[in-house]
């Protein structure tokens, strides 16, 4: 359910599906909290699955926002976009958190930051991955780029931009 221009509320059934998907996806790769592409490696397995479920929920929230179908059990793993053809979803529970782009993120995608925790997710903004990878956003001690929310464009501008040409037009 879209509550306002940037906040989505998911249902309890959505939460179950996100957890089921997180468990299933994790099992497919025999994932652990300490695998090399994660920076938050000091958490236990249950917390890791909860974070994974929140990430899946963020993808679901964006899919709902744009009225896209989504298969939560699809193992995308940087081979294809999280949502639609080119939307890379980044999640943080910090309301003022940064969008973090990694070297392995596809330059042709649009990165979308989602903040919050179940049941409320706020789409904080977007930026093309290629622009996010500019030197000005490079983290000083990690091999990635951190983009503060004030550098992101509001989500409602994406469909009106050249980058949103393939997105459905919302009412």
Image (tube, helix red, strand yellow):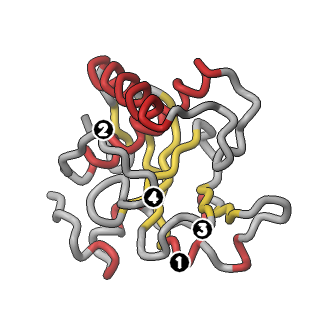
Q: Which structural element holds mark 2?
A: loop
Mark with earlier residue (1, 4): 4
**Residue 158 is drawn in which quadrant?**
bottom left
| Marks 2/1: CA–CA distance | 26 Å
Residue at x 18%, y 47% (from the top left corner) = 69
Can you identify the residue that label 4 sits on?
A: 78
Judged by depth in the image, the label closer to the viewer, 2 or 4, is 4
Q: Earlier in the sequence, mark 1 or mark 3?
A: 1
| In this view, the mark in front (4 or 3) | 4
Placement of 75 over or under 93, stated as above or below: below
Residue closer to the observer: 15 or 125: 15
Which circle marks residue 130 in the picture? 1
From the image, state whether disc 1 or disc 3 is nearer to you. Answer: 1
> Residue, x 32% and y 29% (percent of image)?
10
Q: Nearer the viewer, residue 12 or 70?
A: 70
Q: Is residue 163 above or below residue 53?
A: below
Dot 2 crowding, Cα within 10 Å, few <14, some 14–19, many 20+: many
* The label number, if any, that marks residue 151 in the structure image: 3
Q: Residues within 10 Å of mark 3 (few under 14, many from 20)?
A: some
- Circle 1 packing at 10 Å, graded few (<14), some (14-19), many (20+), is some
> Is disc 3 placed on a helix, strand or loop?
helix
Inter-mark Cα distance, 2 to 4: 15 Å
Looking at the rendered image, the disc whose residue lies closer to the viewer, 2 or 1, is 2
- Considering every residue shown, the one lying at the far right of the view is 141
Residue 50 place in picture, x, y as percent: 53, 24
Which callout, 4 or 3, points at the residue further toward the start of the chain?
A: 4
Q: From the viewer's perspective, is the residue at label 1 or at label 4 nearer?
A: 4
Say which residue appears at 42% left-offset and 35% top-offset. Answer: 28
Q: Quadrant of the C terminus?
A: bottom left
The residue pinned by badge 2 equals 72
């Amino acid at each position: 359910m879209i509550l306002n221009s940037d906040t989505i509320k998911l249902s309890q059934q959505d939460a179950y599906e996100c957890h089921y998907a997180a468990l299933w996806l994790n099992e497919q790769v025999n994932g652990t909290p300490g695998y090399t592409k994660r920076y938050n490696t000091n958490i236990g397995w249950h917390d890791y699955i909860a974070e994974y479920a929140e990430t899946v929920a963020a993808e679901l929230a964006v899919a709902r926002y744009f009225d896209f179908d989504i298969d939560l059990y699809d193992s995308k793993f940087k081979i294809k976009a999280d949502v639609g053809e080119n939307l890379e979803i980044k999640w943080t529970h910090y309301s003022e958190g940064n969008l973090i782009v990694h070297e392995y993120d596809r330059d042709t995608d649009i990165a979308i930051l989602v903040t919050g925790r179940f049941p409320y997710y706020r789409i904080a903004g977007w930026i093309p991955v290629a622009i996010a990878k500019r030197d000005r956003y490079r983290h000083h001690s990690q091999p990635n780029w951190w983009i503060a929310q004030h550098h992101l464009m509001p989500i409602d501008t994406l469909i009106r931009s050249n980058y949103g040409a393939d997105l459905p037009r919302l009412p």
